[in-house]
Image (spheres, grey):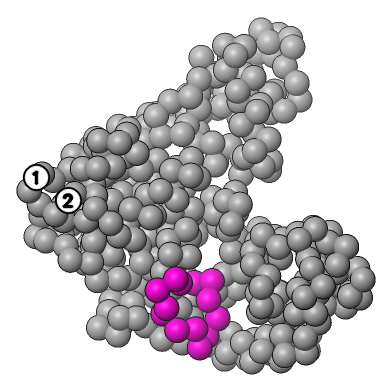
Amino acid sequence: MNTNLTKLLYQIALTQIEGVGDILARNLIDTIGSAEEVFRSSKKSLIAVKGISTYLADAVLDPKVLENAEKELLFVEKNSIQTLFYTDDDYCYRLKECIDAPILLYYKGNADLNATKIISIVGTRKSTNYGNDFCDNFLADLVSAFPDVLIISGLAYGIDIQAHKSALKHNLATVGVLAHGLDRIYPSGHRKTAVEMLENGGLLTEFPSRTEPDRFNFVRRNRIVAGMSDATIVVQSDSKGGALITAEMANSYNKDVFALPGRISDKESAGCNMLIEDNKAILLQSADSFIKHMQWDAGKQINKPKQRQLFLDLSNDEQAVYDLLATIESLHINLIANQLGVPISNLLSVLLTMEMKGIVRTIAGGSYQLL
């Protein structure tokens, strides 16, 4: 087995350990050094890692973990599936900033998961013509302004599949995030659309093959839908449902959330109206209003001289942010973090200090610009 496959084998194995989730897996990597070193460690070394008990150390060293990983590696190779480990450069950088992001993703497709603009569209599985028509009209208008925007959803009945179909109709790349492995399509009736998405978009999952589409997996799937986009749009939702969970997750990740309002008598719009009433979502009326709120209509490039002498007390981090914003009208915090190569947690502190100094300001959509 070559070096790359060996590395991948241990990365897959890290996701196969019973009782060790994404956060503990990252603790293991951060403390020990690599996935391979984790499995070559002694029980004593494993127990020394924060959060790893004697029981979990035994689970790591269970020979069945590597045996299962070998089976999954064969499936990945046979089906030409791309894997994205959270330390890889091409891992979804927006998602990486989420504390509970999957450490490993399986991907089949051709869309850029780090596209400049990414939107998640979610909603009820019992959508009406009102919701379906909005999806189609919204994307028809959006594509004329931003033909490279990537549309994310969950391939489920209702709004999800409508979002995928409308994206394909208007030649927008669209990615479906699955609650199971890439060895199946659920629901099976969406297979034709899923195949089309492989040509202009793709299918993404954290789950290995032979994973059943169990109820809890859909909740886990929702955090990827919310985490890898700039904004989440809830088109229709009852007062309870997966779309509202996705909206809550998006809010917890400091993402923008939008909701399409509906008549108070329509139960399919009860969840959207509730999000708007509770100030958990921005009222969405059209593609134009969305673009305005996201500040995507701002000029992309302006000529601003770099004048460090105006801010003699800038730290190195502050100067880096200033120099970057001096070349562009505004930039989303995720893109600032990506281009500067710093964690959002650190960047937020820098930006707050710069706001207090009167150097930058935050604008709608989670973007920043120089004053």
Q: Is mark 1 on a helix, strand or loop?
A: loop
| Residue 203 inside the magenta-drawn segment | no
Residue 162 placement (x, y as % from top left): 22, 65
Q: Distance between the residues labelled 2 and 1?
A: 7 Å
Tag 2: amino acid? Ser
Residue bearing mark 1: 263
Q: Quadrant of the N terminus?
A: bottom right
Residue bearing mark 2: 269
Among numbered discs 2 and 1, the one appearing first in the sequence: 1
Residue 265 placement (x, y as % from top left): 7, 48
Residues rendered magenta in the picture? 205-217
Tag 1: amino acid? Arg
Residue 61 placement (x, y as % from top left): 81, 82
Asked if the residues shown at circle 2 and circle 1 are in contact, with their CB atoms under 8 angstroms apart, the answer is yes
Residue 134 placement (x, y as % from top left): 16, 52
Viewer-proximal residue among 26 and 327: 26
Can the viewer see residue 3? no
Relative to 331, say whether 152 is above or below: below
Q: Please tell me which residue is depicted at 67% across the width and 60% down the height of the picture.
A: 23
| Residue 214 inside the magenta-drawn segment | yes
Relative to 306, say whether 264 is above or below: below
